Amino acid sequence: MKKSTTENEKKMDKTFDKKELKKEAKISKNQHGSETNNQKIIADLKIKLKEAEDKLLRELAENENLRKRHEKESQENLKYAIRNFSTELLNVTDNFQRALSSIPRENLGENVMLKNLVIGLEAVEKEIYEIFERNGVVRFDSLEKKFNPEIHQAVSKKNSDKPEGTIIEELAKGFMIGERLLRPAMVVVSSGKNQEEK
């Protein structure tokens, strides 16, 4: 009976060993399969991570571009916000200039009150133009320069000794606000010498 027990034990051990081997083979196969599966998952995650990084970089670049554009627009809005106010005030300065130029200069030495009035008005005019300049509104001279349709408005043409296309009279000064034209200069342009004089 002892012998059969030992044989039974040996058979059971063999059966158990076979089951263990099958189990280990199955586990090994599952592990190998899961390693392959894990590698596939890791590769997919790497691809998704790369796509997410690319998308994030694009979004950051887009946000930076929007921020710069908004900043530029804000600066331009501030710079040109006084445009309408300046344009309306230029009409006042033109009338002021006309009033000053209508005062006869030859009698200023004789009339002290008139002389003081002109000096005061010229001081006010100078201060107005300084205020304009501090706010980015600058006048430009056009007299004896070549006519430029982008910054000049020709009111008329006259025969003169100056070459054709040269500005011979400036009826109203032109003004720039920053790099933009606020108001063109109103000018009279030379049409050259009269044909009969040639």
Image: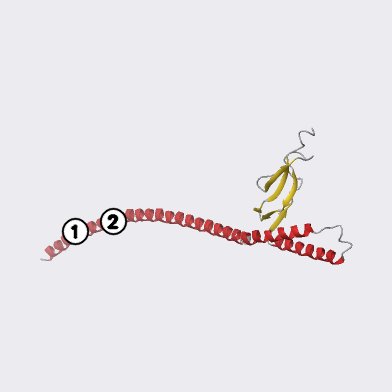
Residue, disc 2: 28
Q: Nearer the viewer, residue 118 or 54?
A: 118
Residue, disc 1: 14
> Which amino acid does the dot numbered 1 rest on?
Lys
Q: Residues within 10 Å of mark 2 (few under 14, many from 20)?
A: few
Q: Nearer the viewer, residue 35 or 157?
A: 157
In the shown orientation, is residue 111 left or right of residue 160?
right
Residue 195 image offset from top left, x and y in percent: 76, 33
* Residue closest to the far right: 110
Residue 187 position (above or below residue 56): above
Q: Identify the element where label 1 is drawn.
A: helix
In the shown orientation, is residue 27 left or right of residue 134?
left
**Residue 146 shows in the view:** no
Rendered residue at 79%/62% (across/down): 122
Residue 96 image offset from top left, x and y in percent: 73, 61
Residue 11 falls in image quadrant: bottom left
Residue 147 image offset from top left, x and y in percent: 70, 44
Rendered residue at 72%/46% (across/down): 188
